[in-house]
Amino acid sequence: QVQLVESGGGSVQAGGSLRLSCAVSGYVNCMAWLRQAPRKERAGVALIYVRFGITTYADSVKGRFTISRDSAKNTLYLQMDSLKAEDTAIYYCAAASVNCEVTGLVPSRFEYWGQGAQVAVSS
């Protein structure tokens, strides 16, 4: 049984940084961070191929966010730098048993989800 438990998040001023963590139990092939802003649909932010460490980012966060994984700790991270007001959202850790080629950054293709973490960026 796969379980994802998130931690981190909070409030920060524009230009600041935050880091999200996601403790993972069970075997998965693809992991990702997705977010849902107020009155918007859930959208993919970044993903990582568990086996090869290859990463993919949404255009809106490229150069500012970094997804990484510590295999020894079974933990997924999202380092968020140069935060903008439009980054305000609930951030979800997600995982899939299929490869990332199948999921892409499409929320409906991920089987397992964390509980969500609020990130609020004030301008």
Image (cartoon, rainbow, N blue to C red):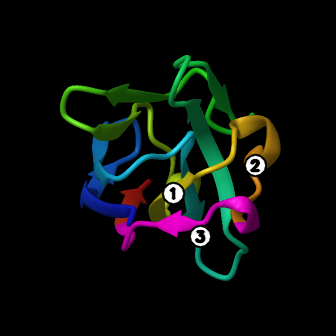
Labels 3 and 2: the sequence-earlier one:
3
Q: Secondary structure at mark 1?
A: strand
Q: Mark 3 or 2, which is nearer the eye?
A: 2
Q: Secondary structure at mark 3?
A: loop
Residue with the mark numbered 3: 37
The numbered mark at residue 28 is none
Could you classify mark 3 by the number of other residues whose Cα lies within 10 Å: few (under 14), some (14-19), or many (20 or more)? some
Please check the rendered image and state whether residue 121 is part of the magenta-colored stretch, yes or no.
no
The numbered mark at residue 94 is 1
Type of residue at label 3? Ala
Type of residue at label 1? Ala
Please check the rendered image and state whether residue 112 is part of the magenta-colored stretch, yes or no.
yes
Residue with the mark numbered 2: 103
Identified at 60% across, 19% down, the residue is 54
Q: Is residue 19 visible?
A: yes
Residue 73: x percent and y percent? 19, 34
Labels 3 and 1: the sequence-earlier one:
3
In this rendering, the answer to whether 99 lies above or below 105 is above
Spatial separation of the CA atoms under disc 3 and disc 1? 16 Å
* Camera-side residue of 88 and 30: 30
The magenta stretch is: 108-117
Identified at 28% across, 40% down, the residue is 75
